[in-house]
Amino acid sequence: MGSWFQRPTPEFIKITAPQTREVRDRIPKDLWHKCPNCGAIITRKDFKANLSVCPACGRHERISAMDRIQQLVDEGSFKENNASLRATDPLNFVDKRKYSESLEAARKKTGLNDSLVSGTAHIGGVEVSLGVMDFAFMGGSMGSVLGEKVTRAMELSIERRIPCITVTSTGGARMQEGILSLMQMAKTSILCAELEQAGIPFISILADPSTAGVMASFASLGDVIIAEPGAYVGFAGKRVIEQTINKVLPADFQTSEFQREHGFVDMVVERARLRKTLIVLLRQLMAMPPIPLEEEEGSDSQVVVGKA
Ligand SMILES: [Zn+2]
Protein backbone atom coordinates (compact mmCIF):
# COMPACT_ATOMS: atom_id res chain seq x y z
CA MET A 1 0.00 0.00 0.00
CA GLY A 2 1.20 3.52 -0.80
CA SER A 3 2.16 5.90 1.96
CA TRP A 4 -0.76 8.21 1.11
CA PHE A 5 -3.14 5.59 2.49
CA GLN A 6 -1.56 5.49 5.95
CA ARG A 7 -3.14 6.95 9.02
CA PRO A 8 -2.17 10.54 9.74
CA THR A 9 0.56 10.97 12.33
CA PRO A 10 -0.54 11.82 15.86
CA GLU A 11 1.07 15.30 15.46
CA PHE A 12 -1.20 15.96 12.48
CA ILE A 13 -4.25 14.93 14.44
CA LYS A 14 -3.23 17.22 17.27
CA ILE A 15 -2.97 20.26 15.01
CA THR A 16 -6.30 19.74 13.24
CA ALA A 17 -8.27 18.77 16.31
CA PRO A 18 -10.88 21.42 17.11
CA GLN A 19 -9.56 23.76 19.79
CA THR A 20 -11.29 23.23 23.08
CA ARG A 21 -11.49 26.04 25.58
CA GLU A 22 -8.86 24.20 27.60
CA VAL A 23 -6.40 24.24 24.65
CA ARG A 24 -7.08 27.92 23.94
CA ASP A 25 -6.49 28.84 27.58
CA ARG A 26 -3.09 27.19 27.47
CA ILE A 27 -1.86 29.77 24.88
CA PRO A 28 -0.35 32.66 26.89
CA LYS A 29 -2.23 35.89 26.28
CA ASP A 30 0.86 38.10 26.15
CA LEU A 31 2.66 35.97 23.55
CA TRP A 32 2.33 38.53 20.76
CA HIS A 33 3.28 42.15 20.27
CA LYS A 34 1.21 44.31 17.92
CA CYS A 35 2.91 47.51 16.75
CA PRO A 36 0.65 50.50 17.54
CA ASN A 37 2.17 52.37 14.58
CA CYS A 38 2.03 49.90 11.66
CA GLY A 39 0.05 46.97 13.07
CA ALA A 40 2.83 44.40 12.47
CA ILE A 41 2.50 41.38 14.75
CA ILE A 42 5.51 39.48 16.13
CA THR A 43 6.13 37.33 19.16
CA ARG A 44 7.11 39.18 22.34
CA LYS A 45 10.27 37.10 22.46
CA ASP A 46 11.37 38.26 18.98
CA PHE A 47 10.32 41.81 19.79
CA LYS A 48 12.48 41.83 22.90
CA ALA A 49 15.38 40.27 20.99
CA ASN A 50 15.03 43.19 18.55
CA LEU A 51 15.52 45.57 21.55
CA SER A 52 11.76 46.42 21.55
CA VAL A 53 11.99 48.06 18.12
CA CYS A 54 9.36 47.16 15.48
CA PRO A 55 11.19 45.29 12.69
CA ALA A 56 8.62 46.49 10.14
CA CYS A 57 8.46 50.26 10.72
CA GLY A 58 11.31 50.91 13.19
CA ARG A 59 9.10 52.33 15.94
CA HIS A 60 11.09 52.46 19.19
CA GLU A 61 8.85 51.28 22.03
CA ARG A 62 9.36 52.63 25.56
CA ILE A 63 11.42 50.23 27.67
CA SER A 64 12.02 49.80 31.39
CA ALA A 65 15.09 51.29 33.07
CA MET A 66 16.47 47.81 33.76
CA ASP A 67 16.05 46.71 30.11
CA ARG A 68 17.80 49.90 29.01
CA ILE A 69 20.71 49.34 31.35
CA GLN A 70 21.05 45.75 30.17
CA GLN A 71 21.16 46.92 26.55
CA LEU A 72 23.83 49.56 27.16
CA VAL A 73 26.37 48.29 29.68
CA ASP A 74 29.06 45.62 29.62
CA GLU A 75 27.48 42.39 30.85
CA GLY A 76 27.34 42.05 34.62
CA SER A 77 29.05 45.42 35.26
CA PHE A 78 26.09 47.40 36.63
CA LYS A 79 26.10 48.19 40.34
CA GLU A 80 23.00 50.01 41.52
CA ASN A 81 23.26 52.73 44.15
CA ASN A 82 20.78 54.76 46.22
CA ALA A 83 18.06 52.23 45.34
CA SER A 84 16.31 52.64 48.67
CA LEU A 85 15.67 56.40 48.38
CA ARG A 86 11.91 56.90 48.63
CA ALA A 87 9.72 59.96 48.26
CA THR A 88 7.67 61.22 51.18
CA ASP A 89 4.46 63.20 50.87
CA PRO A 90 5.34 66.52 52.53
CA LEU A 91 2.30 68.36 51.13
CA ASN A 92 -0.20 65.57 51.93
CA PHE A 93 -1.22 65.98 48.33
CA VAL A 94 -4.51 64.57 47.05
CA ASP A 95 -5.77 64.65 43.45
CA LYS A 96 -7.75 61.61 42.24
CA ARG A 97 -6.21 59.83 45.19
CA LYS A 98 -3.54 60.43 47.80
CA TYR A 99 0.00 60.94 46.47
CA SER A 100 1.23 58.31 48.93
CA GLU A 101 -1.19 55.80 47.34
CA SER A 102 -0.05 56.68 43.81
CA LEU A 103 3.54 56.10 44.92
CA GLU A 104 2.68 52.75 46.42
CA ALA A 105 0.84 51.64 43.26
CA ALA A 106 3.79 52.69 41.07
CA ARG A 107 6.23 50.82 43.30
CA LYS A 108 4.14 47.70 43.04
CA LYS A 109 3.76 48.00 39.26
CA THR A 110 7.45 48.60 38.47
CA GLY A 111 9.32 47.04 41.37
CA LEU A 112 11.22 50.34 41.71
CA ASN A 113 11.22 52.89 44.51
CA ASP A 114 11.12 55.88 42.12
CA SER A 115 11.31 56.85 38.46
CA LEU A 116 15.10 56.64 38.03
CA VAL A 117 17.60 53.83 38.46
CA SER A 118 21.19 54.94 39.09
CA GLY A 119 24.52 53.26 39.54
CA THR A 120 27.92 52.64 38.03
CA ALA A 121 28.80 50.39 35.11
CA HIS A 122 31.32 49.87 32.36
CA ILE A 123 30.50 50.61 28.72
CA GLY A 124 33.17 49.37 26.34
CA GLY A 125 35.51 49.16 29.31
CA VAL A 126 34.93 52.80 30.35
CA GLU A 127 33.55 53.26 33.85
CA VAL A 128 30.51 55.55 33.93
CA SER A 129 27.99 56.91 36.40
CA LEU A 130 24.54 56.19 35.03
CA GLY A 131 21.01 57.47 35.65
CA VAL A 132 18.16 55.87 33.68
CA MET A 133 14.51 56.91 33.88
CA ASP A 134 11.53 54.57 33.81
CA PHE A 135 8.39 56.04 32.23
CA ALA A 136 6.24 53.33 33.80
CA PHE A 137 6.83 54.88 37.24
CA MET A 138 4.32 57.78 37.32
CA GLY A 139 5.15 58.91 33.78
CA GLY A 140 8.85 59.20 34.59
CA SER A 141 8.09 62.32 36.61
CA MET A 142 10.84 64.28 38.38
CA GLY A 143 10.32 64.62 42.10
CA SER A 144 12.82 65.19 44.89
CA VAL A 145 14.09 61.58 44.77
CA LEU A 146 14.89 61.73 41.05
CA GLY A 147 16.57 65.13 41.49
CA GLU A 148 18.63 63.82 44.39
CA LYS A 149 19.65 60.66 42.51
CA VAL A 150 20.71 62.62 39.40
CA THR A 151 22.64 65.01 41.65
CA ARG A 152 24.40 62.13 43.44
CA ALA A 153 25.18 60.43 40.10
CA MET A 154 26.85 63.63 38.89
CA GLU A 155 28.70 64.15 42.19
CA LEU A 156 30.02 60.61 41.90
CA SER A 157 31.23 61.41 38.36
CA ILE A 158 33.17 64.41 39.64
CA GLU A 159 34.58 62.53 42.64
CA ARG A 160 35.73 59.52 40.60
CA ARG A 161 36.43 61.52 37.40
CA ILE A 162 34.24 59.23 35.28
CA PRO A 163 31.71 60.31 32.61
CA CYS A 164 28.05 60.72 33.49
CA ILE A 165 25.22 59.40 31.30
CA THR A 166 21.51 59.96 31.75
CA VAL A 167 18.67 58.40 29.77
CA THR A 168 15.43 60.37 30.03
CA SER A 169 11.84 59.28 29.42
CA THR A 170 9.55 61.69 31.16
CA GLY A 171 6.47 63.87 31.13
CA GLY A 172 8.19 66.41 33.39
CA ALA A 173 8.03 67.57 37.00
CA ARG A 174 5.97 65.64 39.58
CA MET A 175 3.22 68.10 40.43
CA GLN A 176 2.26 66.19 43.58
CA GLU A 177 5.46 67.56 45.14
CA GLY A 178 4.71 71.14 44.08
CA ILE A 179 7.65 73.55 44.33
CA LEU A 180 9.90 70.77 45.64
CA SER A 181 9.77 69.09 42.23
CA LEU A 182 10.47 72.34 40.37
CA MET A 183 13.51 72.97 42.61
CA GLN A 184 15.09 69.83 41.14
CA MET A 185 15.52 71.73 37.86
CA ALA A 186 17.86 74.24 39.50
CA LYS A 187 19.58 71.59 41.60
CA THR A 188 20.45 69.29 38.68
CA SER A 189 21.42 72.23 36.43
CA ILE A 190 23.96 73.39 39.00
CA LEU A 191 25.57 69.93 38.94
CA CYS A 192 25.76 70.06 35.13
CA ALA A 193 27.73 73.30 35.48
CA GLU A 194 29.99 71.67 38.08
CA LEU A 195 30.62 68.72 35.75
CA GLU A 196 31.65 71.16 33.05
CA GLN A 197 33.99 73.03 35.39
CA ALA A 198 35.57 69.74 36.42
CA GLY A 199 36.01 68.76 32.76
CA ILE A 200 33.93 65.59 33.12
CA PRO A 201 31.89 64.55 30.05
CA PHE A 202 28.12 64.37 30.41
CA ILE A 203 26.11 62.52 27.76
CA SER A 204 22.34 63.00 27.71
CA ILE A 205 20.25 60.39 25.88
CA LEU A 206 16.68 61.39 25.07
CA ALA A 207 14.18 58.55 24.75
CA ASP A 208 10.47 58.94 24.06
CA PRO A 209 9.17 61.23 25.53
CA SER A 210 11.68 63.79 26.85
CA THR A 211 9.77 66.88 27.83
CA ALA A 212 8.97 69.67 30.30
CA GLY A 213 10.90 70.14 33.55
CA VAL A 214 13.49 67.44 32.84
CA MET A 215 14.04 68.76 29.31
CA ALA A 216 14.32 72.31 30.68
CA SER A 217 17.09 71.21 33.06
CA PHE A 218 19.73 68.46 32.96
CA ALA A 219 18.46 66.58 29.87
CA SER A 220 19.21 69.56 27.63
CA LEU A 221 22.58 70.33 29.24
CA GLY A 222 24.60 67.35 28.00
CA ASP A 223 27.96 67.91 26.29
CA VAL A 224 26.60 65.45 23.76
CA ILE A 225 22.85 65.04 23.30
CA ILE A 226 21.70 61.85 21.60
CA ALA A 227 18.05 61.09 20.79
CA GLU A 228 16.29 57.92 19.74
CA PRO A 229 14.48 58.03 16.36
CA GLY A 230 10.94 59.41 16.45
CA ALA A 231 11.07 60.35 20.14
CA TYR A 232 8.92 63.25 21.33
CA VAL A 233 11.44 65.88 22.39
CA GLY A 234 10.39 69.35 23.52
CA PHE A 235 9.22 71.52 26.39
CA ALA A 236 5.50 72.31 26.10
CA GLY A 237 2.98 70.35 24.02
CA LYS A 238 2.40 71.28 20.38
CA ARG A 239 -1.23 72.37 20.87
CA VAL A 240 -0.34 74.63 23.78
CA ILE A 241 2.31 76.38 21.68
CA GLU A 242 -0.01 76.72 18.68
CA GLN A 243 -2.65 78.34 20.84
CA THR A 244 -0.11 80.66 22.45
CA ILE A 245 1.59 81.94 19.29
CA ASN A 246 -1.51 81.54 17.09
CA LYS A 247 0.41 79.72 14.34
CA VAL A 248 0.25 76.20 12.87
CA LEU A 249 3.43 74.24 13.57
CA PRO A 250 5.02 71.70 11.16
CA ALA A 251 3.88 68.05 11.43
CA ASP A 252 7.27 66.78 12.61
CA PHE A 253 7.62 69.55 15.22
CA GLN A 254 9.21 68.30 18.47
CA THR A 255 10.54 65.02 17.13
CA SER A 256 14.18 63.94 17.54
CA GLU A 257 14.78 64.51 13.83
CA PHE A 258 13.32 68.04 13.91
CA GLN A 259 15.46 68.91 16.94
CA ARG A 260 18.59 67.60 15.24
CA GLU A 261 17.87 69.66 12.11
CA HIS A 262 17.56 72.74 14.30
CA GLY A 263 20.75 72.08 16.22
CA PHE A 264 19.32 71.10 19.60
CA VAL A 265 20.14 67.40 19.31
CA ASP A 266 23.62 66.28 18.17
CA MET A 267 22.76 62.81 16.93
CA VAL A 268 19.72 60.62 16.32
CA VAL A 269 20.86 57.06 16.96
CA GLU A 270 18.88 53.84 16.51
CA ARG A 271 18.66 51.66 19.58
CA ALA A 272 20.61 48.89 17.85
CA ARG A 273 23.58 51.26 17.47
CA LEU A 274 23.32 53.12 20.75
CA ARG A 275 25.75 50.99 22.75
CA LYS A 276 28.34 51.03 19.97
CA THR A 277 28.00 54.82 19.58
CA LEU A 278 28.50 55.27 23.33
CA ILE A 279 31.61 53.08 23.32
CA VAL A 280 33.22 55.11 20.54
CA LEU A 281 32.20 58.44 22.11
CA LEU A 282 33.25 57.55 25.64
CA ARG A 283 36.65 56.30 24.57
CA GLN A 284 37.21 59.44 22.47
CA LEU A 285 36.10 61.73 25.29
CA MET A 286 38.29 59.93 27.85
CA ALA A 287 41.29 59.90 25.44
CA MET A 288 41.38 56.10 25.46
CA PRO A 289 42.42 54.07 22.39
CA PRO A 290 39.53 52.66 20.31
CA ILE A 291 38.66 49.00 20.80
CA PRO A 292 37.53 46.54 18.12
CA LEU A 293 33.75 46.32 18.29
CA GLU A 294 31.77 43.12 18.02
CA GLU A 295 30.31 42.23 14.63
CA GLU A 296 26.70 42.95 15.60
CA GLU A 297 27.72 46.33 16.93
CA GLY A 298 28.91 47.51 13.48
CA SER A 299 32.35 48.36 12.25
CA ASP A 300 32.50 52.16 12.35
CA SER A 301 35.31 53.48 14.50
CA GLN A 302 34.47 57.16 14.20
CA VAL A 303 31.41 59.02 15.39
CA VAL A 304 31.05 62.54 14.03
CA VAL A 305 29.04 64.69 16.41
CA GLY A 306 26.70 67.29 14.99
CA LYS A 307 26.19 65.79 11.55
CA ALA A 308 23.19 63.91 10.24
ZN1 LIG B 1 5.64 48.93 13.38
Image: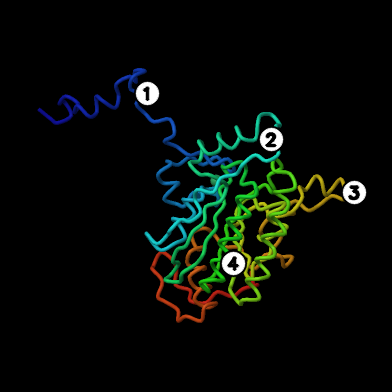
Of helix, strand and loop, which one carries label 4? Answer: strand
Of helix, strand and loop, which one carries label 3? Answer: loop
Which quarter of the picture shows residue 221? bottom right
Q: Separation of disc 2 and disc 3 at Cα?
A: 38 Å
Position above or below: 92 against 74: above
Tell which tag, 1 or 2, sits nearer the viewer.
2
Tell which tag, 4 or 1, sits nearer the viewer.
4
Tell which tag, 2 or 3, sits nearer the viewer.
2
Q: Residues within 10 Å of mark 3 (few under 14, many from 20)?
A: few
Residue 209: percent from the left, percent from the top? 64, 50
Tell which tag, 3 or 4, sits nearer the viewer.
4
User: Cβ(mark 1) to ligand 1 < 8 Å?
Assistant: no
Tell which tag, 3 or 1, sits nearer the viewer.
3
Position above or below: 166 against 146: below
With 266 as the anchor, is 240 left or right in this view?
Answer: right
Query: Are the residues at dot 4 and dot 1 in contact (C-beta closer than 8 Å)?
Result: no
The residue tagged 2 is 92
Q: Give the mark nearest the N terminus, 3 or 4.
A: 4
Amino acid at circle 3: Asn
Amino acid at circle 4: Ile
Q: Separation of disc 3 and disc 1 at Cα?
A: 54 Å
Query: Are the residues at dot 1 and dot 2 in contact (C-beta closer than 8 Å)?
Result: no
Residue 162: percent from the left, percent from the top? 52, 71
Q: Give the mark nearest the N terminus, 2 or 4.
A: 2
Q: Mark on residue 24?
A: 1
Q: Is residue 192 visible?
A: yes
Query: Which is nearer the eye, 79 or 169?
Result: 79
Tell which tag, 2 or 4, sits nearer the viewer.
2
Residue 265: percent from the left, percent from the top? 67, 65
Which quarter of the picture shows residue 218? bottom right
Amino acid at circle 1: Arg
